[in-house]
Amino acid sequence: MAMIIGSLGWILASTAGILKESHFLRYVSTSVAVVALLISLPLHMLVAHRVSTRRGLTRQFNGGEVNLSSIRKEYKDFRQRFDSVQIASFVELILDPRAFRGRVNEDIEVRRRVLRQNVVVSLDIPAEKIGKTLLIPVLRPSKGELQDDLTVMLDGEPMATLTYREYLIMITMIMDTLLTPAPATLTVEEVGNLRRNAKVALKLVATRRSLNGDEIKKVNRCAKRITRLAPRAGESLVLAAVLLRRLANNYVIVGILPAGGEERANRSLSYGRYIIPSLKLGSLKALLGLLLGARPKHVSLDLSVAATAHSYHLLVMGPEGTYVGWQNLTDGTGLLESGSSREKLTRPYSRLRRRLGQRYLHLYLRSVPSKVARKLRLDIKFFEVPPGSMAGAALAAAANFALVLLISLIIPSAYTLNPAADNPLGSDFPALVLAFPAIAGAFVGYDNRSAALVGGMLSAKLSSMITVALSLAASGLFMAQQARVLREPAEYGVFGIRDTWWQIVTIVALLNALYAAYTWLARTLAYYWLAQRPDDQYRDGPSEH
């Protein structure tokens, strides 16, 4: 920071003639100061801002491994709370979530910098398990990922969940049980290999942090070695290998469905939390929009939860004053393409609510396999409902052009006839009039009352910024010409204007007004045509992708 201030001071002192050196030394010192400023400014931004914001990414997490011996000492207490049947049901739900889940309804509300997710799961309890205490997997987030403002409910009432310590005890006990081979099925050498791989597998599953690349490779190697022994040692080793792959880099939030009370086959499990989406700044346009205050309008969602139930409904609600302008369901497998009218219910199927100017998106998925759901992405773009911020920006740009044109027709014509003439209006009122669009443009284009994550058109921000700049430039030009400087009579008139500088300001103001008006009209017509098109509820297959 001292280098930046020193460079700026050196430049000002050199150009102002304060230094008494020769012109050559003055030019050299000014050049050195400019180069130092160009170097110090990026360095200052990098060191003072980027490094401090990225510092957390390089911090090493210590203490991620758990002592398995201390966990095994608590097996007895845990077995007194939950029997083997309940634990077996939990393993079944981890391996096949659809065993209990009929339908998932997910609602996402777009807020200022976060998304609020609310999920309702319809649980279909098998007849033989009705009225018994069950362990239900609620979520399977990545290790080390905090769940912000997580609430878990069962039939509208708060649901008890296992602590992370209790989860580690249970999952270690499950892995120990599954990795025990049938008696007299393996050789002594194979038993030793199984024990070594089991030890590695348990440590990786019980690790409390996300695994690195080498550890992920170790997980896959252990799973393959364990699976090769399954034909003779028992199918439980296959289940252990599957659990190892699924839980190595994830943990499970486990809910307790209590026994007793009203015995029903259908229960409602719900949870809500905050999700922080990532900003997409891969283009210059996105970066420019962030600098000018245009909030992100693109939301990308993961749909892996669709594989945990037979049917899946997603409703994404945009902020007030917006509509779904673009939506795309990315399917790398092609299994969700439209089929025939006689297709089986077990075939993967998808349908998107058609865009008709509404502020929400509705997606329906059915029978989606896990391998497909992992690759599904839903991309949404929200646009402002006309007139929006573009109307105010267009009106401010039009007012700016009209005032600049009016003043430029009065002032320069008098100066052209008599270059030494004073202001023919006899006051500084035109300067105040010319500055009015700057105030209006700033108010319209940079109003911060909205608290939405998406919104604020980049076009409106750019037009408002240009309006502010033109208004201040016109006001400054008027005051400069009143002081008898910047008077450049033009040989050819433009719009009847005979001053070069006023011609430039007026032409730019006209282009800005035309751009804002065209954008306003185009967005309005696009919304009108979108809202007026017929619905497709009687057509077959996905409506839009």
Image (cartoon, rainbow, N blue to C red):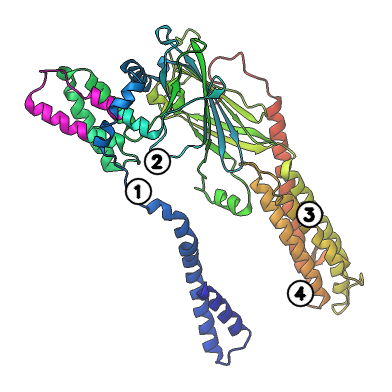
Residue type at mark 3: give it: Ala
Q: Magenta part mainly helix, strand or loop? A: helix
Q: CA distance from mark 4 to mark 3?
A: 27 Å
Name which quarter of the figure residue 226 lies in: top left
In front: label 3 or label 1: 1
The residue carrying mark 2 is: 144
Residue type at mark 4: give it: Leu
Is the C-beta separation of discs 1 and 2 under 8 Å? yes
In front: label 4 or label 3: 3
Q: Which mark is residue 486?
A: 4
**Picture coordinates of residue 389, whole percent (x, y):** 72, 44
The residue carrying mark 1 is: 61
**Picture coordinates of residue 198, whole percent (x, y):** 20, 31
Asked if residue 496 can be seen in this view, the reply is: no
**Picture coordinates of residue 283, whole percent (x, y):** 52, 48
Q: Residue at x 83, y 75 (%)?
A: 482
- Depth check: 310 or 76 in front? 76
In the image, which residues are magenta?
Answer: 172-199
Element under label 3?
A: helix
